Image (cartoon, coloured by chain):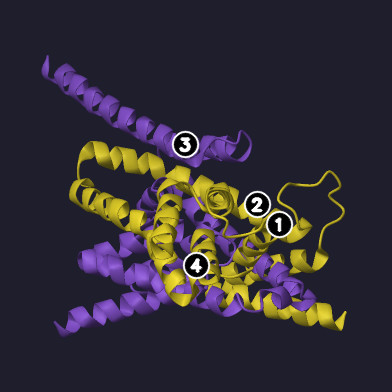
Chain colours: A yellow, B purple
Amino acid sequence: MIYGQLLWSFFQIGLFSIGGGYAAMPLIQHQVMDVHPWLTMTQFADIMTIAEMTPGPIAINAATFVGIRVAGIPGAVVATAGCVLPSCCIVMALAYVYYRFRGLDTVKGVLAALRPAVVAMIASAGLSLLIMAFYGQRTLPADLGGINWLSAALFGSSLFVLRRFRAKPIYVMLGAGALGTLASLII
Amino acid sequence: MKRQKGVYRKLFTSTLKLSAGTFGGGFVIVPLMREKFVNDLRWIDEQEMLDLVAIAESSPGAIAVNASILVGYHVAGCLGALVAVLGTVLPPLIIISVLSGFYGAVRGNAIVNTAMTCMLAGVAAVICDTVLTMGAGVLRQRRLLYPAVMVLSFIAVRFLGVNIVAVILACAAVGAADTVLRKHGGQFHRKAVKRP
């Protein structure tokens, strides 16, 4: 039963991927290449590239892609449902616990110490994205001169517009994409 | 009842738009959520949002999906959480379904690649803006503990490659220990005052 297999595979991916998209990649690879012969290595690399280029979580993108290849649109829906099912159960329980107990002194103390850590993690993720935008790779290269100046200019002006005029994030993101494409076509 | 329905619709359209805008990984949801749920709709405050992100990160599954569940649950209970999940998964589901037919053409396309790289610069700026605002908020706090937690967490995640969940658990332990110490400190202090 192909729908059952899709549901179970992506349920496991959803259950065991903790800490964001890149943690999910090896799990997805294991399920769709080793456990089931659903994708070839090339197809897997393709879906990872597409997942990075399109909005939405990597695991959901992969679930849709694999589901549609294996069993059409219903397959995509089933795989996606399997992927979010563990989140729904676990996070809803945590939401209940959070809103029930956040008034307690100890819980308040724990949450107060977690908030700065969350800011630090967002900062780290932002720095990775910045390096990706400037140098086209995940880690900082030895030669810092090979910077993409168009990206650097877009980053600078985006940040200025955000800080100075409180522009809406989504417009800044789309604007940077549109302006940069236009500029590179002219240059 | 009518107002309730309005909330579900608002929740669905908001999460739909947020999900369609999360290019570049799960953390991009943070500035977008801040804009929509904290500044626009005022459903949650900024501190609460950081709590929700901490829970979303340390739970299994995608950060964007988990964060939507948390906001949905807060605004309209379990049904709200389900509505929020639906809004979050629909954009990638539709986009990938459409793309899967001709993804070869998109993947190798030079213009698409340029647009993505340029958009990434904008995304990085959006995250940078959020970090500047929130980081300043942390630094303004009177207790030295919180800036210290922020700097040490950054070093641990960025340079030492420590797992995010491990960092969250460590910081939770620090927070708990801090609360216990302060409580006892308060009791000792009270006794000391009473004695004379």
Residue A139, given in percent of the width and then of the height, sits at 73, 47
Decide which of B6, B152 is in the foreground and name it. Answer: B6
- Report whether mark 4 lies on the same chain as mark 2: yes
What's the CA distance linking mark 2 and mark 3? Answer: 18 Å
Q: Are marks 3 and 4 in contact (CB under 8 Å)?
A: no
Residue A102, given in percent of the width and then of the height, sits at 23, 47
Circle 4: is it few (<14), some (14-19), or many (20+) Cα within 10 Å?
many
What's the CA distance linking mark 3 and mark 4? Answer: 34 Å
For label 3, the SS is helix
Decide which of A64, A70 is in the foreground and name it. Answer: A70
Amino acid carrying label 3: it is Val
Residue B51, given in percent of the width and then of the height, sits at 36, 51
Residue at image mark 3? B167
Circle 1: is it few (<14), some (14-19), or many (20+) Cα within 10 Å?
many
Residue A182, given in percent of the width and then of the height, sits at 77, 82
- Report whether mark 2 lies on the same chain as mark 3: no
For label 2, the SS is helix
Q: Which mark is residue A67?
A: 4
Q: Is residue B89 visible?
A: yes
* Count of number-bearing discs: 4
What's the CA distance linking mark 4 and mark 1? Answer: 30 Å
Q: For mark 4, name the chain.
A: A
Q: For mark 2, name the chain.
A: A
